[in-house]
Amino acid sequence: MDTDRRIQDIKDRLAYIRDIFGGKEDDHIRLLTAKLGEVLDRDAATPGGVQAEELSRLEDLFAFSERKLDTQLTPMDRVRIVRHPQRICLKDILENVYDNYTEIGGRGEFNIDPSMLIARAYFSRRVGERIVNQMVMVIGQEKGHGEAYRNGGSVKPWGNAKALHYMKVAETENIPIHTFVFTPGAYPVEDWPGAAQQIARNLYEMAALRAPVVAVFSEGGSGGAEAVGLADRRIMLSHGYYSVISPEGAAAIEGGLRTDSRATPELIEKCARQLRITALDNLENGYVDRVLQEPPLGARPTHYDFFRDLRRELIQATNEAVSEVRSMKLFRAMAVRASVGDAEVVFMRWNLSSSASNRLVDLRQRKFRAMSRHACLDGTGLIKRMAASARGTVWAANSFLRYDLLGRQKKRLDAMLEDLGAEAHIVRRKLLMPLKRIMDSILPVTNVEQQKKGDAVRDRLTRLSCPEDGACLVGSEWAWISPRSQEDRTVSCPQVRTHHCPDLWVPDLYGDFAGVCPSCGHHFPMEYPWYLHNVFDYDRSREFNQRLESMNPLGYEQFDAKLDQAKERTGLKSACITFETAINGVETVVAVLCAPFRGGSVGAAEGEKFIRAAERAGRKRQPFIAYVHGTAGIRIQEGVNGVIQMPRCTIAVRRYIDGGGLYLVLYDTNSYAGPVASFLGCSPYQFAVHSSNIGFAGPGVIAETTGMAVAPDYHSAYHALSRGHIHGIWDRREVRKNLHQALLTMGGRNLYYR
Amino acid sequence: MLNIKELLDTVKASPYREIVIHAPHTGVVEFTGLKAGDRVHGRFGEYKEKPGTLLGHLTREKNKKPIHAPEKGEVGMIRTELEGKFVEAGEPLVTIKHFLTRQEVIELVLQKALYLFRAPERAKYYFVPEVDQKLKVSGKRSVKVREGMELMIVSRMKRETPLSYSGPEGIIYSVYFGRGDNVDEGEPLIGVCPEDQLSVIQDVVARIQSEWEEE
């Protein structure tokens, strides 16, 4: 009986190896197959079955070969390991790493989203004579060894909302959070709370979550990973991957394939290698703090030693995060640093005082701020850089003096005077009105002067439009007109079938009409300079960080040439333009994402520029406007250097908003994926220009991942509005007016003009 | 009285609808090389988002506009002599013979033969208890309706109001709503036919069901 079980076990191991190497032929695999075949033959021929020693020899050979094969793993093999149904999942970890746990927020299939698993778990630790239970909140995606209802760990928006809810619970209860990233990516549906918007919300909250967070990455698929991945300590399992896109997705884009055709395995393999997705790559780039070694060919549920290591690593990481910010630690901080091998020795309570959690949040924000600096090129000279940093300090000091130290006193005084004035007004009214009424009844006087004034006002309000007052403008009112308006031809409006719009003459359309169909209001896509000049007064603006340049940090094949081409064609150095300008007299910092530069995709340079703009706005107490002319998402050729901009920029935005600023996002044309799921989608004020599309994944990707076709207008701004993702839709010609009104009426307490 | 046999004969004599595609405005016509007798299809896709077969282009002021087939069918006549020529608005360009499907023929016959009593507002509709009883016991063809007869109860937002039938006298041929369904405004509730035509209509529908070939 025992022999049968052992033979079956060896057979399973061989099947697993075959799965991992995806049909590749290898000497080791051939040898193992042959040896196993021999043993099986002998087992069938011998009456009592094979000897136990023979099986032990075979097992040893397997162990040896597995170790050998482990050294040959390619990035794509690791992807297959992570996706294998035998890969450890969160339930295994809860069973084997923690001493006890209670699943909350649903059980198994009876769950708002079975792919997101929440549990209250604890470690039992011996401290002297006592046993202490150290509680944590465990949050993570559950792949469930191939259970269909788990959806492969692809979390729906409401699953991420559940995760966020329990993060807040952990914050209230003052316990650490352990998050486990086991996701190929988020499930791309737009229904409330919206895939992108919910991830953005998670990032926004985690950016300042007042509880220690330790994240463990096994399968980190882009946006889905970020929804729970913003942590104080990030541990990565050695056979895991963390990537901006699945290798298949990258290959499909690289090969320029349509939805119904498949990329070749070689191309996929190449993309997996180029994207630098493995644990060591990420450690090298500084996006994870530590790599936890797994058994050869990846951890499976029977590797109990691995679970012990993981337990030690989790305790160590939590201790580190806590000891960094606790005030009472003395020797333990040293011990924590020294005890990498044996974390269980050090005991430390994991609840934090208020000041300690402030320090924790600050450290977390600094940690992410420092990431990915190597992935963009800063052409600014050393002297200029120093000058800029000195200027930043001066602005901060000036704002502090003007608006905090003195401004606050002045505000208080103003408020007091206002109150006094209002009180006096009431008293005066109560005393004098009866007197006036008596006087009026005794001596009725008609004030001719006043009556005249009243007539004039009535006349102005009631008369019809007067062309002589300038109601009919002659010539174009636009400061910049699209070069397309030079063509002498007509175009048809795309809504002609439903709205029966007449054909439009191009000089009219792109000239006076500003690209808006006068019949149905459809907005034809417009070049970004139109907005720069007609909305943001670009000629009088001060652009900054102009020399911050996109590069090819991963050495992605042929990308240098493509990047150079984009730079040459647009005259930009990255897809982001940042400048200071005045909108009807209100000084504002503006960041523009330009679609013509690599689809407006966000990489390290764009992220860095965006962050610096947010910091500048914060220092100068100015409102911060992000105008998204169009973005296709995170730049996949930059790999994790791009993805990491999601938490980085969101943290910058969070810091800015917490500092009392006004952060407003305006979407135009098409805005999708990563940026919408982070620093754009987290804004409390998001507006869109007519006829724009906003979403998480495009229709092709939705059809591919969810298997359902979506309506052609699924991502239209009006649908986004009715789903609650954005808060208003603006006419292009009124953007400036609306922006000005928003600047005056929205936003925080710390704007310089309030 | 409507002669259903005659109607059916006319449908049979020309079992298709001829769709004439006119030039929507002036312009230069280019065809895509379709010939008389070629099959074309109309808009398709789950949301009817994909256009029908491209028939040709009409160019005016350098704006080249595609002309698509509106429905499935066969090209009857195509004015290839106009290729590359300037045409006036309203000029017939292509005719498409759209073969009527079984469903379309039945609809056509019923439309002519039945009086449809439509829902005056979006609500749930029930028959009044007496009618309901009768419908249940002896089937829908047993209920006779006449002008002013209290036939239904309109139930909407916790209020219930009676609804009287208005239209020609006859018997209920078909009921188009289910119990507890919300019916939109203007949707048909019941189809009524004159009593003497009942058997004829039933017969014709059964024959179309079995004999009509075009799906």
Image (cartoon, coloured by chain):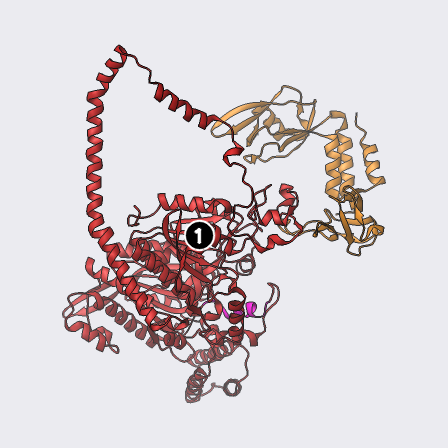
Residue A745 drawn in magenta: no
Residue that label 1 marks: A536
Relative horizontal placement of residue A286, taking residue A724 as reference (left or right) = left
| Three-letter amino acid code of the residue under disc 1 | Phe
State the orange chain: B
Q: Secondary structure at mark 1?
A: loop
Expressed as whole percent of the image width and height from the top left, the position of residue A144 reads: 43, 64
- Which residue reaches farthest top? A442
Vertical side of B13 occupied by A431: above or below: above
Vertical side of A227 occupied by A87: above or below: below
For the residue pair A38 and A15, the one nearer the viewer reads as A15
Quarter location, residue B23: top right
Label 1 CA crowd tier, 10 Å (few <14, some 14–19, many 20+): many
Number of numbered discs visible in the structure rendering = 1
Quarter location, residue A437: top left
Expressed as whole percent of the image width and height from the top left, the position of residue A99 reads: 28, 66
Expressed as whole percent of the image width and height from the top left, the position of residue A673 reads: 47, 59
Vertical side of A440 occupied by A398: above or below: below
The answer, for residue A234, to whether it is visible in the render is: no
> What is the magenta range?
A244-256
The residue marked by circle 1 belongs to what chain? A
The answer, for residue A586, to whether it is visible in the render is: yes
Q: Could you tell me which residue is drawn at 39 percent across and 22 percent down? A: A452
Q: Quadrant of the N terminus of chain B?
A: top right
Q: Could you tell me which residue is drawn at 24 percent across and 70 percent down? A: A320
Relative horizontal placement of residue A260, taking residue A79 as reference (left or right) = right
Q: Could you tell me which residue is drawn at 52 percent across and 36 percent down? A: A471
State the red chain: A
Q: Magenta part mainly helix, strand or loop?
A: helix
